[in-house]
Image: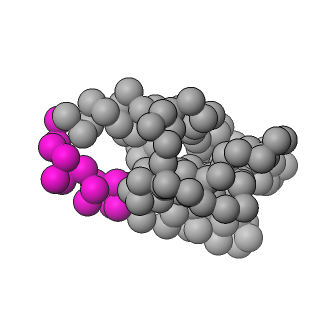
Amino acid sequence: MLIGTSPLNAPGWRQASPSPRAEPTLLSHAVLDDLRDLIGTESFGAFLAQVHADLCAAAEDIARADAAGDFAGLRRHSHAMIGVAGAIGATEVEEVARALNAAARATDIEGTRSRVAVLRRISEALCDEIAWQREGQRPL
């Protein structure tokens, strides 16, 4: 990895090393391992594909709701993100989505905007990380 570069925004790719878990992560590899054991290796790829699609869609929906000033949409889509992030042990994303949900319930414009900005950044990183997991790759 390049010095001073986060693995979540590195410019290139390489095949996963024997110990990719040494890198900082938004995912809980313990939760992912448990899920893989529970649903089986054959189904795990499809599961990750669905999680990836659901998280990325929720992030896009949150951005649209924020741009429209749609508090009900922010509540609905942050609730979806809470569930999906929680299911894979992505606690940082889950916590920010919960804070966004609370701010949207309170119709707190500043609170929602600040949380949407953070959630946009970390949910994008999480979507990338899930894609890397699915492809067996990680950033340089």
Q: Quadrant of residue 61?
A: bottom right
Q: Residue at x 49, y 54 (%)?
A: 15
Render colour scheme:
one colour
Let me know if residue 3 appears in the view: yes
Of residue 24 and residue 62, the one placed in the foreground of this image is 24
Does residue 27 appear left or right of residue 66 in this picture? left
- Where does the magenta region start and end? 38-51
Q: Quadrant of residue 95?
A: top right
Q: In which quadrant of the rendered image does the N terminus lie? A: top right
Of residue 52 and residue 102, the one placed in the foreground of this image is 52
Q: Position of residue 8 (x, y in %)?
A: 66, 49
Position above or below: 12 against 39? below
Q: Residue at x 15, y 43 (%)?
A: 40
Instruction: Tell whether position 46 is magenta.
Output: yes
Q: Position of residue 41 (x, y in %)?
A: 19, 46
Question: What is the tally of numbered marks visible in this picture?
Answer: 0
Of residue 59 and residue 122, the one placed in the foreground of this image is 122
Q: Residue at x 18, y 53 (%)?
A: 43
Of residue 4 and residue 24, the one placed in the foreground of this image is 4
Let me know if residue 71 appears in the view: no
Does residue 21 appear left or right of residue 45 in this picture? right
For the stretch drawn in magenta, the main secondary structure is: helix
Position above or below: 92 against 117? above
Q: Position of residue 22 (x, y in %)?
A: 56, 30
Q: Residue at x 17, y 35 (%)?
A: 38
Instruction: Tell whether position 35 is magenta.
Output: no
Q: Position of residue 93 (x, y in %)?
A: 58, 41
